[in-house]
Image: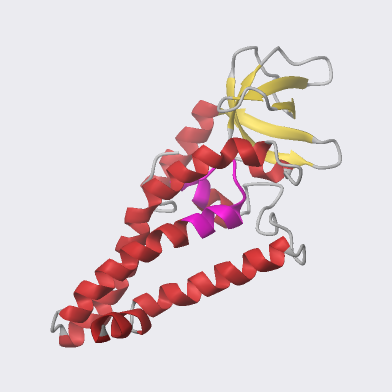
Amino acid sequence: MELFIQTAFGFPFAFFLILLALVAIYWLLAGLRVIRVSCFDHDSLRDDHLASTLISLGFAGVPASFALSALIVTATPIAFALSLVLQWLPLGLLRLPLGFLAIWAAFALASSPSVAACHALARRFHHSRRASPRWLLGETVVVRQASDSEGRCQATLESDSDVIVTLHGKGAGCNAGERRVLVKHVAQEDVYRAVPAEEYLDAHARLRKLHLLPRHDI
């Protein structure tokens, strides 16, 4: 029992206790509607490094706050198991660097199951009464028909065909059947800017080569 107590309040697991407390406080405030669920989401992925990083990890279609919460909650039991091993071993001065390594490993191991959980719940967020257009950024859509004279066209989410969005591009128009990725929401017009899926993936591949994004598939 003493080992479990020392593990729970020692490094590195104490770091996750703090994160869990922050998650609990955040969702309490969100439930009381003191803050918005979408407070971490922005209208564009261009300057939103948090959303871009989460999408590069596979979190798309859900609020950034929910994605972070899912990642933290999933990583916590993994972190406790790793911390328990570190607490049991006589590591001496190696405990600190190995503690930081355990934190990274916990998040890395939690990434896939938390992404899967977010994907399973994405449709509920799409149809929620409190849904925000920002939550769709990073999602892939399929164009239903070519752009009209004003450059607008309708598209459906590839992962949820019940969700229809309007695209309005500044450059070349859309073609029916084309796959595009939503990168910006224009609130004044309630339309989205989107880029061809191939260009979006190519851009992220180049960023990964420059070590500007984690090496995860979208």
Q: Residue at x 24, y 74 (%)?
A: 84
- Residue 169 horizontal side relative to residue 116, left or right: right
Q: Position of residue 51 (x, y in %)?
A: 57, 51
Q: Residue at x 39, y 47 (%)?
A: 113
Let me know if residue 49 appears in the view: no
Q: Position of residue 120 (x, y in %)?
A: 50, 38
Q: Residue at x 15, y 83 (%)?
A: 91
Q: In terms of depth relative to the viewer, which is nearer, 149 or 39?
A: 39
Classified by dominant secondary structure, the portion drawn in magenta counts as helix
Q: Position of residue 35 (x, y in %)?
A: 74, 64
Q: Position of residue 183 (x, y in %)?
A: 64, 39
Q: Where 48 sits versus 144, above or below?
A: below
Boundaries of the magenta span: 54-70
Q: Residue at x 58, y 69 (%)?
A: 24
Q: Quadrant of residue 10?
A: bottom left
Q: In terms of depth relative to the viewer, which is nearer, 125 or 168?
A: 125
Residue lying furthest left in this view?
Answer: 90
Let me know if residue 200 appears in the view: yes
- Residue 89 horizontal side relative to residue 116, left or right: left
Q: In terms of depth relative to the viewer, which is nearer, 27 or 193?
A: 27
Q: Quadrant of residue 7?
A: bottom left
